[in-house]
Image: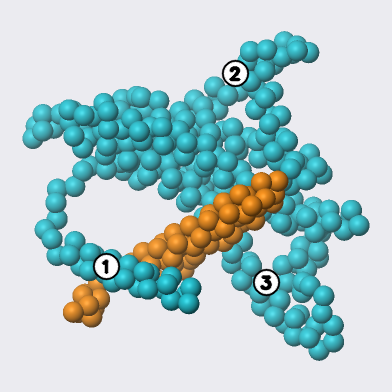
Chain colours: A cyan, B orange
Amino acid sequence: MRNRYLSLPILTLVCAIAVAASTFAAAPEKAEHEALPLNPAPLVQIGKFGITNSMLVTWIVATGIIILAQAATRKIKPIPSGAQNFWEWLVEGLYNFLEGIIGRKLVQKTFWFFATLFIFILFVNWFGLIPGVGTIGWGHHDPTTGLFHIDRPLLRGGNADLNMTTAMAAIFFLLWLIWAIQANGIGGFLLHLFGPKGETSGILKLVMVVIFFLVGWLEIISILFRPVSLSFRLFGNIYAGESTLEVMSKMVPFLSWLLPLPFYFLEILVGVVQALVFMLLTAVFTLLIAEHQSETAHS
Amino acid sequence: MILPLLAEMSGSIHVGLAAMGVGIGIGLTGMGMATAVGRNPGAFTPVLVHGILAIAFTEAIVFYALFLLPH
């Protein structure tokens, strides 16, 4: 009964979308807004190696984090205040949060990576929201609208570049492999992928061995897609956010100061949520492959 | 009426359909998570971990549609 209620709206939705899609296709194409380009613009070209505006942002943010953290912890006080208090609050909060999720042993080993990911992604996301990022740069005067159009912005949100997010996901994938083999050994790692799970005996056990061997290949495909989905999730969210801000500020010219404002608050929220999701997912993936070992160690 | 329209559709429809299904699936997961936390607020962390995992597995479907099928 419940299924029927659920499937009927879905079917009507599919039909409605089919109709809508064909109507839009038939309509004459409107002059599109010049959206944010997918690729970051190169600033300096040294041989084959180009320095792009999103790279510049990641360097600025990384340098900023390093300098602020060093300055805050130069004179460590037993009762922290000011900047030292902030960093201690951030790091301790992250540590306790991660300890609750992946356990005491694993968090000691992997905290450096997950905390770095969270702090870096968060500040890169928020840096991209500062007015001036994406609006200062080289461009040309558009004679039809009489407005100045930016072709090559000086700065671009670091995670609005697929290269950056792919690099972080690839580093995680490599570390995941190392941690998995350290926790299980090569044989244990393969057993974790292909070995039968659950309590069975007799002829059913034989069937289960075959089934779980085949399931192992599915698992490998899903594992190989993890870096892809990790990188595209972060890139998609940040890029879509920047595009939304751009479109909103161009939609109604005399309201361009007001329309993007609610979306800026949304983007502040999205920046935190995406940093959290990236850290949580990488942590949980690590927990999944390493918990086998820690469970047997406990029992 | 609908059949000629469907026949005229072309492009990466499978990606759109996958994205739609994934949206519905993630919504259902979120509903389950919210219900579970409302029912038992103390179980926030385990619910979050399982929910995030389920969302990640659901989300992967749209990437399968994007990359595994020829366009």
- At label 3, the amino acid type is Gly
Q: Is residue A138 visible?
A: no
Q: Position of residue A40 (x, y in %)?
A: 37, 39
- Of residues B57 and B36, the one drawn nearer to the viewer in this rendering: B36
Q: Are marks 3 and 2 on the same chain?
A: yes
**Up/down of A189 relative to A297, above or below:** below
Q: Give the residue type at disc 2.
A: Leu
Chain ID, mark 1: A
Asked if residue A48 lies left or right of residue B4, the reply is right
Question: Residue at image x 91%, y 57%?
Answer: A299
Q: Amino acid at mark 1?
A: Ala
**Residues marked 1 and 3, same chain:** yes
**Above or below, comparing residue A131 to residue A292 in the picture:** above
Mark 1 and mark 2: Cα distance apart in space: 53 Å
* Residue positioned 63% across, 66% down in the render: A220
The spot of residue A34 in percent (x, y) is 22, 42
Q: What is the number of the mark on residue A68?
A: 2
Picture residue at 27% right of the left edge, 32% below the top: A259
Q: Residue furthest bottom?
A: A203
Q: Secondary structure at mark 2?
A: helix
Circle 1: element type: helix
The residue singled out by tag 1 in the image is: A16
The numbered mark, 1 or 2, whose residue comes first in the sequence reads: 1
The CA distance from mark 1 to mark 3 is: 39 Å
Q: Residues within 10 Å of mark 3 (few under 14, many from 20)?
A: some
SS at badge 3: helix
Residue A137 or residue A292, whichever sits in front? A292
Cα distance, mark 3 to mark 2? 46 Å
* Numbered tag placed on residue A216 in the rendering: 3
Q: Residue at x 67, y 16 (%)?
A: A84
Choose the circle earlier in sequence order: 1 or 3: 1
